[in-house]
Every structure is written in C-alpha cells, then in structure tokens.
Image (cartoon, helix red, strand yellow):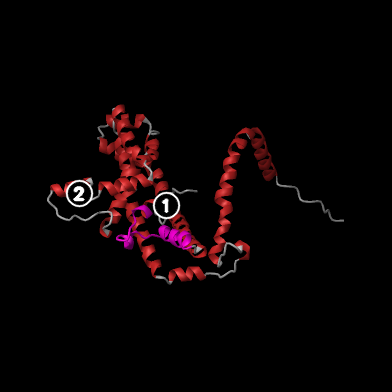
Amino acid sequence: MANTAPAAQPKNVKSSFDIMLKQTVKNWQLILMVLPAVIIVILFNYVPMYGVTIAFQDYTPSLGFLGSPWVGFKHFIRFFNSYNAALTIRNTVLLSIYTLLWSFPIPVLLALMLNQVQQAKFKATIQTVTYLPYFISTVVMVSILNLFLSPERGFFGAVTDLLGIANPVNPITDPTLFRSVYIASGIWQGTGFQSIVYLATLSGVDPTLYEAAMIDGASKFQRIRHIDFPTLLPTVTIMFIMACGGLMNVGFEKTYLMQNQLNLGVSEVLSTYVYKVGLESAQYSFSTAINLFNTVINIFLLLLMNWLSDKMSQTSLL
C-alpha cells in the first residue's frame, strides 16, 4: 500500500518562519511602537485606492461605488478627445522637465561647495540661510512673489523705475515669464533643504582620502572630482530616479496660486485641471480618470528610469 503521508515541509522554509517568529517576539515593543503608523498608512494610503474604480464608472454619490454604472474607458476617451488634454499635458511636461533640468543639479553643487568650507561658523550660517526659505508656506511664498514682482509697488517696479523703463510687464501675469518665475522661486525655496541628503552622504567620506590627495598635490577641484563626486553619484542617481518618478506631479498649490486669466495658457497643468473639474464642477469620475492617467505615467517613468539606471550604473531602487 502506497504511503500517503503528507510531504515534509522544507527545512529552510520552516527555519525562516521560526527565525521571523522569534524576532517578532523578541522585538514586540518596537513592532507595537510602529503599529499605529502602519495602520494610518494602510487606512489613508491603501484603502482609498479602491476609489480609482470610479474612473471606470458614471459615479453618483447617492449610488456609491457599488451602485454606480460601469462605463469602461469612456472618461479617458473623453479627456483625450478634448482640447484641454493636449494643453494640460504639454504644460505639465514642459514645466516638469524645465524644473528638473534647472532645479536638480543646484543642490548637488551647493553640497559640494559647502563640503569644502573649513570654517564651521560660516558653513553653519550658509546652511541656515539656505534652509530657511523651505519652511515658508506656499501661500506666503506666492504672496511674497506678488509683492516683490509688482510693477507698481514691488522691488521689481522700483528697479524698472530706476532704469527708466515705462510700463514694465508683470512677470506673474506674463505667460512668457511664468515658468521662469516658477522655477527660480522653487530653486530659491528648496535648494538648501534638498542639499541635506547630499551633505549627509559627503560627511561619510573618510578624511584620510582628502589627506592623501593633498599630500599628492591634488587641488580642491581634483578632490571634488575624484573623491566627492564618485561618493555622491549613487545618491544622486537614486534621487534622480525618484524625481523622474514624480515628473508629472507639478506642485498643485503653487501653480494654482500663481495662476490667473492672463497666464492660464501656460499654467493650466493636470493637477489644477483635475481640481477644477473634480471639486469645482463635481465631475468625479472624469477627474479621477485624468488623475489615474497621470499616476500611470509616473509609475512608467519611475520603472523605466530605474531599469535604465540599473543597466547603465548598477544603481537602482531595488
């Protein structure tokens, strides 16, 4: 008679489970401490994901998720056939790419320069001055821009008066200057804070490498090129991949607050359009479809850049 006893569980699987169970029991205090944060993330980040189903429905609040009729890709087709699709996608892509090209390298350069400063007090002062703008709220930031660049009562107006320029344009309302103002103000506000991660990476460099390079007669530029930059490269690569993953997520608050009827042709991006059609016009399914399209593009860019980075430099998120 054949032996019908169940197959024995592989030893490696059983031992791995036992190790995990022992570690869980051993570190139960740490697990208990992090449990509220995990529950919050699940409730506010994962449970709401079910709401993307309304992108494929004619959603009505009174009928709910389960009662609203399914319409497939109707809202996606409607968006791509509309005039606003080409306008908002173009504005989003251009503003995102320009922001990435101009804003990404400057924190790296700032970190490299600050790392060469020997006087601790001067270095701390520069760091404080560059960090502070990051903590200004977006509303206050845009208010400062409106006052600073006002042709009538701002610093920009005072300079144009001094130069004898009559009827100067307002950079906030001028469509040709909107992206420049957006990017420049973002660089001023975020460069110092974004450089922290690069400074932290450089702080881990072995000082003996600098000493050996100085003994060999290496200049500051050579030390940056052959010691600092190779140390920063993996971190820069990871940060660049993450930046590409959020390429289509142009900051909603700042763009919306800087928006007006005169610059609407260049400032209307996907996030502001979703807000207007979703909350102001109550087209919930339509706005969800647009936002889902935006999210899918971001995921694709993240995976693509991660794959390219892994193939070219063996550096990736995974």
Front one among 140 and 102: 140
Crowding at dot 2, Cα within 10 Å, few <14 / some 14-19 / many 20+, comes out as many
What's the amino acid at mark 2? Gly
Front one among 121 and 112: 121
Question: Can residue 244 be seen by looking at this rendering?
Answer: yes
Spatial separation of the CA atoms under disc 2 and disc 1: 46 Å
Q: Which of marks 2 and 1 is nearer the N terminus?
A: 2
Question: Can residue 105 be seen by looking at this rendering?
Answer: no
Magenta span has 310? no
Q: Horizontally, is 22 left or right of 256 in the view?
A: right
Q: Horizontally, is 171 left or right of 313 in the view?
A: left
Do the residues under discs 2 and 1 have CB atoms within 8 angstroms? Answer: no
Locate residue 136: give its quadrant: top left
Q: Is mark 1 on a helix, strand or loop?
A: helix
Locate residue 89: give its quadrant: bottom left
Crowding at dot 1, Cα within 10 Å, few <14 / some 14-19 / many 20+, comes out as some
Magenta span has 277? yes
What's the amino acid at mark 1? Ser
Kindly identify which residue carries mark 2.
157
Which residue, as the protein is rendered here, is positioned at the far left?
Answer: 164
Compared with 233, 298 (above or below) is below
Q: Is mark 2 on a helix, strand or loop?
A: helix
Kindly identify which residue carries mark 1.
309
Residue drawn at (56%, 55%) of the image: 49
- Of marks 2 and 1, the one in the foreground: 2
Which residue, as the protein is rendered here, is positioned at the far front?
Answer: 152
Residue 21: x %, y % from top left: 67, 39
Count of residue discs: 2
Residue 44: x %, y % from top left: 56, 49
Boundaries of the magenta span: 256-281
